[in-house]
Image: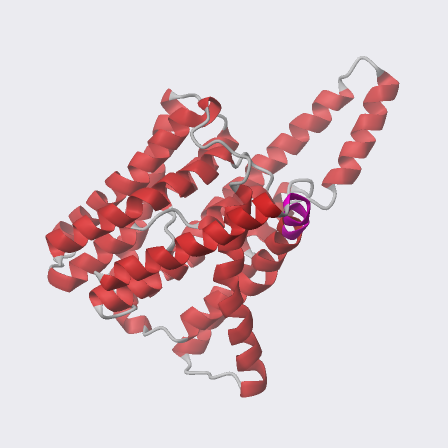
Amino acid sequence: MSGVLLGFAIVLVLVGVGFVAAWVLPGEARAMQRGIAPLVYYITNPALMFLLMSDADLGAVLRTYTPIALITAAATGLLYAVVAGGLLRRPAGPVAAGAMASSYVNAGNIGVPIALYAVGTAAPVVSVLIAQLLVVAPVYLSVFAWCRHRAARAGRFAAARSDDDVTSGSAADAGAGADTAGPGTRSLGATLARSLANPVTVATGLGLLAAAFSVDLPAVLGQPVEMLGHASVPLLLLLFGMSLRGQRPLGREARAEVVLGTVLKSLVMPVLAWVVGRFLFGLDGLDLLGVVLMAALPTAQNVFLFAGHFRLATTSVRDITLVSMLLALPISLLVTLLLG
């Protein structure tokens, strides 16, 4: 029980610091957000994933925990896509972002203390990270890249069809120049390849190779990587806290998606994990507790980072992340009481 409380307390304090910083220093906070986001995406988060994977006991996590994590995440994301895309008729980009938010858990920081203190082993959290970073994240990032590519094509086509040739030409030129550095203006094949080879996935693969072959980095490399990795979680939580300043959660324009994503993430996903773990893999005791606790974790702030990187709508992602974080503590405590 203390591990659950500790994990959530750390996260809430750091998010609060980011929110207060944006409130007290609004101008500086905007500059910090622009700098922190690429720093975390390209440097500190890959370093953290390499550290976590390089210490993994692969035999213990790949046999059972990782397949359960994949099945649960896929089923939850598919449910969101069917309802949001089929019934609510939302566009592809917001549907993809919401599906990831409803099924991608915050295992990297909250999950570690919870797994260690509540279950006694890091195997459940490492298995979730392997599933998410090597399979789930590349799939979603490829979909994000496709959505961004399609939106860029639609924007250029609309500009070309404008009645005002001069204004249209200037806008198209400016838009093309602005989008050149973005992830959606390359050819679709190049964009997908770049998404699959994103820094986090590459670092995760390298970490798993290091674990498989028992490779230890020399101190001159290992210690800098460790320092950068340890900086990732607080920077990401600060960034998320800053993004909450001036926002009104559960705004009317995205309320249906937020309610849908939160229900799937906070309630449906843990139940699915229990069903899959108990009846398909025959788990019980602490093993089953670890699986369900990982599924009950809130949405990872990485989803907000990824959606913003591909210039998708982040309102529903931010709100699902926030509400699922508030619900995760009582749900995790209930899971611990029922299964612990």
Q: Is residue 105 magenta?
A: no
Residue occupying the point 38% across, 48% down: 104
Main SS, magenta residues: helix
Q: How is the rendered protein coloured? A: secondary structure
Residue occupying the point 32% across, 65% down: 113
| Occupied quadrant, residue 255 | top left
Q: Is residue 30 magenta?
A: yes
Q: Residue furthest right?
A: 166
| Occupied quadrant, residue 173 | top right
Residue occupying the point 71% across, 21% down: 158
Q: 309 above or below 210?
A: above
Quadrant including the C terminus: bottom left
Q: Which residues are magenta?
A: 26-32
Q: 147 above or below 207?
A: above
Q: 337 above or below 52?
A: above
Q: Nearer the viewer, residue 153 or 89?
A: 89
Q: 130 above or below 257?
A: below
